[in-house]
Image (cartoon, rainbow, N blue to C red):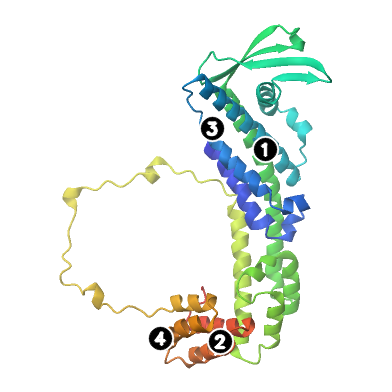
Amino acid sequence: MEEDVKYKLDQIEDIWNHFILEYAFCKHKINFTPEVRTNYLGDILGYFQDTFDIIFNNRESKSYSDKFSNQISLLQSIYVQQDFIEELLIIFKCGIDKGVLKKDSNYSINREIRNELVGHPIRKIKGEFISSCLFGYNGGSDKIVYLRYHKDNNYKFESMEFAVSDIILRHKFFLDKYFDKILNKLKSILLSFVKKIENLEVLIGTKSFKEILNIMSVFYESIFKYDFIYDKESLLNIYARKDEHRRYQNLIDKFYCDLKSSLNEKKEYAITLFEPKKVFEVSETERPIFDINNIEFIDTSGRTPFEDIERPVTYHYELGKIATKRNPMDFNHFGGCLRIKCADNQIVINELKHMESNIYNEIEYYSAYRLICTELKEDDD
């Protein structure tokens, strides 16, 4: 029961983090107010996660005080989650307000129980006494019992009794219903965004470099955080110098490659977010059964010892260090290690010298760095 609603909440969180917060195109589809801009929605999502256990894992009460505490925690957690659902519906422009929620029995019944026991155990309206309620101690942990005196019943004694399982089930139906409405709205946003990405993919081959940067700054701004010196100003500077040296053209080529790859990955990710949740059958997760009597042991005495096997030369470690440790001492050490490994590669040696001479110039440093990565086929760094 809990896993279903947690899965839907995780979907909402993923879309929020990887699409809404990343792209102005998606922000414009919701109520992205200055308050929402503070990302207080992250607090809401965190509160949901923190209270799921209180709601869906009914605790055994060993005393009256335990029962009192557990039931108040349950009702208050449901109440707060209801309020947060209302807030999410507003943020995502779902067209559902509190008036609509009040007509939903899965909302109103649980809310009334909470209000009578926790919110207003003694209720007055404009000074007029309406009702009073008191927790009852009869019954086990599986039900909430309380005594009520209400104006509508001429203040006659009433014993109110609600099964905890019914309260939880109502809330589960409530969460499912409105999480689905939120996800349907988010799905429509992502479908629009996917279409926009497909249009951008076409434009890459038809627009000038400057036009592409202008378009991406409006519709796909995350590309400018994709790698070092991918900010718009630096890219224009490098593009203007692309005929001066291979390092500049290489950087532009890599930007185009990264842009195409990023657009495709983002498009595929948006699509997979709404694929049906895979449910594994028991047979798929069962461990294989081994018959120890049929295990065959292999004689490895004739094989070459592991330490005698020549390992391929790798550059990943040194490249990672000179990409992030930009000071003369670190560069001398890690750049020196790379020089030794690449002593016969004049392009790498020349670009290391260029990096060393321009250690505080980001454009020169990282354009040379990227040419080294290309030369050593380490462009995934």
Callout in the foreground (1, 3):
3
Is disc 1 placed on a helix, strand or loop? Answer: helix
Instruction: Tell me the kind of residue under disc 1.
Output: Tyr
To which residue does mark 1 refer?
A: 178
First in sequence: mark 3 or mark 4? Answer: 3
Which secondary structure, mark 2?
A: helix
Of 66 and 302, nearer the camera is 66
Cα separation, mark 1 vs mark 3, equals: 18 Å
Rounded to the nearest angstrom, the CA distance separating label 3 from label 4 is: 59 Å
Between marks 2 and 4, how big is the CA–CA gap?
Answer: 17 Å
How would you rate the neighbour count of disc 4 (Cα within 10 Å): few for under 14, some for 14-19, many for 20 or more? few
Q: Residues within 10 Å of mark 1 (few under 14, many from 20)?
A: some
Question: On the image, numbered disc 2 is attached to which residue?
Answer: 355
Residue at point 66%, 91% (across, down) = 243
CA–CA distance between discs 4 and 1? 59 Å
Disc 2, disc 1: CB below 8 Å?
no
**Of marks 4 and 1, the one in the foreground:** 4
Task: Kindly identify the amino acid type of the residue bearing the numbered disc 3.
Answer: Phe
Disc number for residue 56: 3
Residue 86 position within the rendered picture, expressed as x and y whole percent measured from the top left: 72, 38
Q: Which residue is mark 4?
A: 341
* Residue extending farthest right: 126
